Image (cartoon, helix red, strand yellow):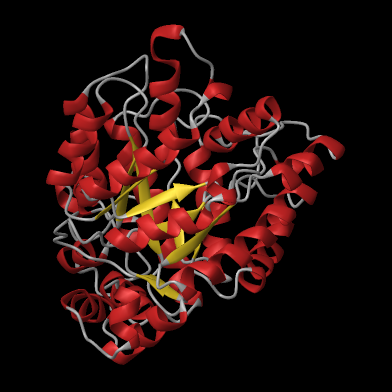
Amino acid sequence: MTLTDSVRQNVVTKEIEEVAKYENLPTEVIIKGVADGSIVIPKNVNRIQKMPRAIGAGLKTKINANLGTSPDHINVKEELEKMEIAVKYGADAIMDLSTGGNLLEMRKEILAQCPVQVGTVPIYQVACETVKGGKKKISQMDSELMFDVIEQQAEQGVDFMTIHCGVNMETVSMLDRQPRLMGVVSRGGSFLVKWIRANKRENPYYEQYDRLLKIAKKYDVTLSLGDGFRPGGTPDATDGPQIAELSILGELALRARKEGVQVMIEGPGHIPLDQVQANVLLAKRMTHNSPLYFLGPLVTDIAPGYDHITSAIGGAIAASHGVDFICYVTPAEHLRLPDVDDVKEGVIASKIAAHAADIVKNVKGAREQDYNMSKYRKERNWEKQREFCIDPVKFDKERAKIAPNLKDTCSMCGEFCSMRDEE
């Protein structure tokens, strides 16, 4: 029985209780949201989670951190260190996007050590196994292998999976009629576009969606319906293929709910600032208030090395208008595989964006945290400020740089500090 089936029978599970406590909300709120599909709690039946988290309407905005090996950089120890840093600084979920080395062992280690929910993109493994040895191309992926890998990962304990079901013959045809500057930038989406064009057949994930739902239901895997046509540059934002895919994902979300399978919807991508709100409202409307998982969005394309900032700007706006889950972006985005420091910077930037949005959404406790920080700034209570700041380590590092005689103030104003109004 899936979590959705449980709540529809008014069964209060351990995960429901833990999530409600974390959100400081009544269990009835969580139960109602899971039952109607506006909230998901990704949790595989084969896995124990120390820190279960809910994603959806009325809850704190959650953060995902991507990690994983690449064919050119395979270091399992380093990826596990990235995972620890991401969780330490506030990531609510980890996605293993490994494409190099022993993918099965890499995923096994992450699932064993990660205290939060873990997601994957199964078609990455399918592609890796297909091209291994150089005998086959991506376009020769076996459709049975596509489902075998999903079953394998589900059995291992993966909590949520990105599946690009909306990349089908109809949307690929629209892409051909409405060419883009950057084409398809989603890696999984591009694999399926190549497969559809080469084989002149329908996407197996779309064509055999009921089969996918059966596997997801068996292990209570949450489906994250992938945005295969997300814009990879602001000139391609909010175009025909993106919206057509979104419409299909909305239909598929309803089919998943009917079968008791939890589902969330992935979104763009690169979006100009003035289109972010419209994208969120459109996505919520077209996917029947499903939890939204946005990949950023990045609001400009010109800042390599600083894309954790461009993403935080877009993420704050998107979440303030209803996005429930934002994927972090690191300073290494578009340049290289992120290192441990990049992961930390990406998570913190996203957490700032999420908190800024939670203030706007009146999420319980968000405004109180800002109130307390302001209160203790007024009082020049540095210990209490440290308690409420987002990065106490950074706080300590910067405070250590001031002269000993300025411990009561900062070194910007010193004796002229405006907070010292009693003097």
Q: Quadrant of the N terminus?
A: bottom left
Q: Nearer the viewer, residue 375 or 417?
A: 375
Which residue sits at x=45%, y=42%?
Answer: 329
**Hey, which quadrant is residue 229 in on the image?**
top right
Give the residue drawn at x 40%, y 39%. 122
Compared with residue 15, is residue 311 higher up or lower down, i.e. above or below?
A: above
Pinpoint residue 39: horizontal percent, then vertical percent. 41, 74
Q: Nearer the viewer, residue 196 or 164?
A: 196
The answer to whether one can see residue 51 in this image is: yes
Residue 284, by quadrant, is bottom right
Residue 371 spot, x, y in % from top left: 34, 79
Outermost residue to the right = 177
In the picture, measured across the screen, residue 33 lies left or right of residue 182, that is left
Q: Compare residues 6 and 67 and report the one nearer the observer.
A: 6
Instruction: Tell whether 329 sits left or right of 95.
Output: right
Q: Does residue 301 lie above or below 219 as drawn?
A: above
Residue at the far top: name it: 134
**Quadrant placement of the C terminus:** bottom left
Q: Is residue 26 visible?
A: no
The x and y percentages for residue 173 are 79, 40
Is residue 210 shown above or below 262?
Answer: above
> Where in the figure is residue 55, as x and y percent of width and height?
39, 68
Up-down relation of residue 370 to residue 118 (above or below): below
Q: How many marks?
A: 0
Q: Nearer the viewer, residue 154 or 270?
A: 154
